[in-house]
Image (cartoon, rainbow, N blue to C red):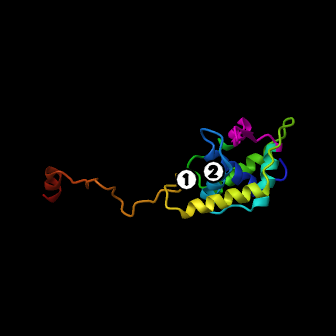
Amino acid sequence: MYPVHDVDAILLLAMSLASKRRPAALVEIIAAADLAQGAIPPETKLSDSFYRLSEYGLIGAQDGGYTLTPDAQLILSGHAKKAKTPERIYDIKESLADFHLNGEHAIVMVTVEQIAAAIAEHQATKRIAVKNLLAPKPKPAEDQRPGQRKQYKSFATRRRKEG
């Protein structure tokens, strides 16, 4: 696939997060992109990326949402599970650079207005104090989890070391 854009890799990563069990709505994909990268790409670039990736047969429309094709899932399965987001994006871009078009595929047309509406809806839900399942969980400030006791050495072990 030539040329490979950062937005293409970000969109594939966001779709892999959002459409694990069912086709993802556009607002879910935007939320996943925001979670993965910390920022949402511009609407025009996202619209172009949807067109490009669907033209290459990597994403498709299904049941009112968007899903990854088996080729795209193969591209996304090639990176380490514990890799950070920039490393994953780099790996996805490398895989996309090696990907070649196989036949003709249905084009997914997502307009700039649809993406802008999804971004506005996502921004509105971020301000509401509801539980966002895509938000990262806060890490505990201390090393010990609540309800967990410290490990103490037995009396016999301490006595042997003292004597």
The answer to whether residue 58 is left or right of residue 14 is right
Q: Which residue lies at the image location 59% right of the left edge and 55% below the top edge?
A: 84
Mark 2 burial class by Cα count in 10 Å: few <14, some 14-19, many 20+ = many
Mark 1 = which residue? 134
Give the label on residue 51, or none: none
Residue 64 falls within the magenta-colored stretch:
yes
The answer to whether residue 29 is left or right of residue 93 is left
Mark yes or no: residue 151 visible: yes
Q: Are marks 2 and 1 in contact (CB under 8 Å)?
A: yes
SS at mark 1 in the image: loop
| Viewer-closest of 70 and 132 | 132
Q: Which residue lies at the image location 74% right of the left edge and 40% below the top edge?
A: 61
Q: Which residue lies at the image location 77% right of the left edge and 58% below the top edge?
A: 113
Mark earlier in primary sequence (2, 1): 2
SS at mark 2 in the image: helix
Res 142 quadrant in image: bottom left
Amino acid found under the numbered disc labelled 1: Leu
Res 144 quadrant in image: bottom left
Amino acid found under the numbered disc labelled 2: Glu
Mark yes or no: residue 97 visible: no
Mark 1 burial class by Cα count in 10 Å: few <14, some 14-19, many 20+ = some
Give the label on residue 28, or none: 2
| Viewer-closest of 124 and 48 | 124
The residue range painted magenta reads 55-75
Q: Position of residue 18 (x, y in %)?
A: 62, 47
The answer to whether residue 130 is left or right of residue 24 is left
Q: Position of residue 2 (x, y in %)?
A: 85, 50
Residue 123 position (above or below residue 14)? below
| Viewer-closest of 101 and 29 | 29
Residue 127 falls within the magenta-colored stretch:
no
Q: Position of residue 6 (x, y in %)?
A: 74, 57
Give the spatial CA distance, label 2 vs label 1.
Answer: 9 Å
